[in-house]
Image: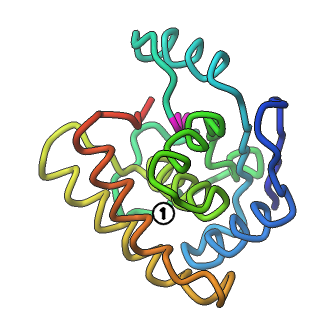
Amino acid sequence: MGVVLRNLQKVVPIRRARLRKDVDTLRHILGIQKFDLGIICVDNRRIQQINNIYRKKNVPTDVLSFPFYEDLRPGKMPCPVLRDELNLGDIFLGVEFVMQQCQEESLDLHGALTVVTAHGICHLLGYRHETEEEWTEVCMANLTVQNTIQGLVHPEYKVTLSLSLYFCNLYYHTDNIAFI
């Protein structure tokens, strides 16, 4: 099974090969290699449209997740019966929004995209953050994944964990990410 990675924006140059490699590493760490996953990179205008339609929030955001398994409990793996069910869902990355955050905080864009993608995958795997308890759970899942990936994907990249903490703090205070 594989990853479909589409770049539907022209505002931010993205190194798709690196993002694909990072996503493949995330899939391996999480044990979800047999599942298909869609990742769509969009600009602020498009992510704002999607956010408005599905969350009734008319603002751009960094990531929106659309799980194939809507009732999946956190920490449980999907149990597909048919081949067509080997799908986790789709993640829309607001790369322009992420780039703006990175510029404000002097963060690495591609590292941040990996962190945001990991958060989106956690949502596809049933993690939510509608309560403080759920927030703690999803944040810990993100940190665990990022701690594992640190050094595996890009040994020279040593700030992945601090990026995770930054985005966890950002999400907690701004409600930027959504489980749809």
Report which quarter residue 34 is drawn in.
bottom right
Magenta stretch, main secondary structure class: strand
Horizontal and vertical percent for residue 159?
49, 76
Q: Coloring scheme of the render? A: rainbow
Residue in the foreground of this view, choosing between 8 and 125:
8
The quadrant of the picture occupied by the C terminus is top left
Task: Measuring from the top left, give residue 64's x and y in whole percent.
Answer: 52, 34
Residue depicted at 53% across the width and 38% down the height:
63
Along the line of sight, which residue is nearer the eye, 22 or 54? 22
Find numbered disc 1 in the image and state the secondary structure of the residue it sits on. loop
**Which residue is found at the position 49% from the left and 84% from the top?**
148
- Specify whether 18 is left or right of 119: right
**38 relative to 17 in the view: left or right:** left
Decide: is 150 above or below 123.
below
59 and 4: which is toward the camera: 59
| Residue indicated by mark 1 | 77
Q: For the view shown, which residue lies furthest in the left direction?
A: 132
**Quadrant of the drawing holding the N terminus:** bottom right
Q: Does 150 sit above or below residue 60?
A: below
**Going 15% across and 41% down the picture, which residue do you hit?**
131
Residue type at mark 1? Met
Residue 58 placement: quadrant: top left
Residue 151, position as x, y percentages in the image: 59, 89
Residue 134 x %, y %? 20, 50
Count of numbered marks: 1
Specify the segment rendered in magenta.
62-67
